[in-house]
Image: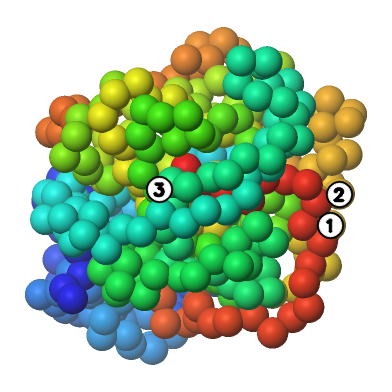
Amino acid sequence: MAALAGAPARQLPQLQVGDEARAYWKSGRKLYRATVEGVNGDGTFSLRYEDGDEWDAVPMDFIRRPDGSTMLPSMDQALASVKTGLKHGVSTCAVDPAGLDALFPAIKAVFRPQVVKYSNTNPSISMKDGKHGERIDWKVSSYMEVDEAMGGAMQRNVTVNPGLLEVCTPLLEQCNRHFSTWYQELHGPGSIRELVRLQSFITRYRPLPNENALLRHIDGAHVDGSVILALPTDMPFEGGGVTVWEGDPEQAYHYSMGPGDMCFLDNYVWHQGNPITAGERWSLVIFYAVSRSSSSRLIRIIQQAAQEKTGSTHHENGKPRDPNGAQQERRQNQGECGVNDGGDTPGNPDLPIIPSSEEDEEEGEADEQGE
């Protein structure tokens, strides 16, 4: 199946032969000076690096302009959030909405929702939305991948859908690239030792009990980061979108999430899929680990808990959170995509996606579903 296009590159001038740039080498761990030696028809570039090494098919998202900006303005939007100290970001039109429109009928044709037990872990949930710790039969998602050792206890009895995986593989590869770019901007080059898709699934929301939303939650202690990609629908919905909570004092960030928009979430970030009251809302969700080592993940969880206990107002990498209220109701509109119904390139061969062989890790009581 042909790979889908990313956000249209024509939005910024392309690099030309002879232009200077900065680019990651194949490991994706550090940016080096490079010169463009060729522009390929598949969207990649041929580069000569400052040490004389050459790579004739450098993916677009491995490349930075001399001023540090990415080749796609949609990623610059998400990376800008990192500079304000936020642990989440949204990329408008990260995936071409027209390509998603073409792919959606195939997704819908093989979508088969499966029952999992969803544990409500929000201690401040209102009575009308349920009780803390309540177990719910959740039948809104069809799973493409579940890592047997690290993918979450609630999904281990789920039968994956190979037909859906085949249809969505180009999307998963693009999500890998986008997430890798955003995560390494947040945590630094080399912070991804091995990119592992713990879970990937398609979710369909409908205006029915236990199917219209996934209320405030985190994605699990074993999850290093997540991606939510908004998909098209053939039944326009009312409501929906994503809300993310961050900061001290806490602020709410609301995103309408048009088709092609992508939301990035770091570990332990509260968020929700907002309720819909009509139609159907579809999204693709991926939970990631950036290493198969449990020790680094445990240290990060302990640090996060200490920050919350002390009321720290600083981001874990030392950058201050945005303290003022100007961004309290930040909204992402889908108008930039030219889409009104409601943001990269193939995967990195040096960040393998392979089954885990480690023993089960401590997962805590954090909820293991997503948008």
Q: Residue at x 84, y 57 (%)?
A: 299
Please determine whether, in this image, residue 104 is positioned above or below residue 308: below
Q: Is residue 313 found left or right of 91 in the rendered image?
A: right
Q: Is residue 290 found left or right of 134 in the rendered image?
A: left
Q: Secondary structure at mark 2?
A: helix
2 or 3: mark nearer the eye:
3
| Spot occupied by residue 257 in the image (x, y as percentages of width and height) | 33, 34
Q: Residue at x 79, y 43 (%)?
A: 304
Q: To which quarter of the image does residue 23 belong?
A: bottom left
Q: Which residue is mark 2?
A: 302
Q: CA distance from mark 1 to mark 2?
A: 5 Å
Q: Secondary structure at mark 1?
A: helix
Q: Residue at x 26, y 69 (%)?
A: 167
**What quarter of the picture does the N terminus occupy?**
bottom left
Q: CA distance from mark 1 to mark 3?
A: 31 Å
Q: Give the residue at the far top of this rendering.
A: 325
Q: Nearer the viewer, residue 223 or 365?
A: 365
Callout 3: few (<14), some (14-19), or many (20+) C-alpha neighbours within 10 Å?
many
Residue 114 visible in the snapshot: yes
Q: Earlier in the sequence, mark 1 or mark 3?
A: 3
Q: Amino acid at mark 3?
A: Thr
Query: Is label 1 in contact with label 2 (beta carbons under 8 Å)?
Result: yes
Q: Earlier in the sequence, mark 2 or mark 3?
A: 3
Q: CA distance from mark 2 to mark 3?
A: 31 Å
Please determine whether, in this image, residue 270 is positioned above or below residue 285: above
Q: Secondary structure at mark 3?
A: strand
Q: Which residue is mark 3?
A: 203
Q: Which residue is mark 1?
A: 299
Tag shown at residue 183: none
Please determine whether, in this image, residue 8 is positioned above or below residue 42: above
Q: Amino acid at mark 2?
A: Ile
Q: Amino acid at mark 1?
A: Ile
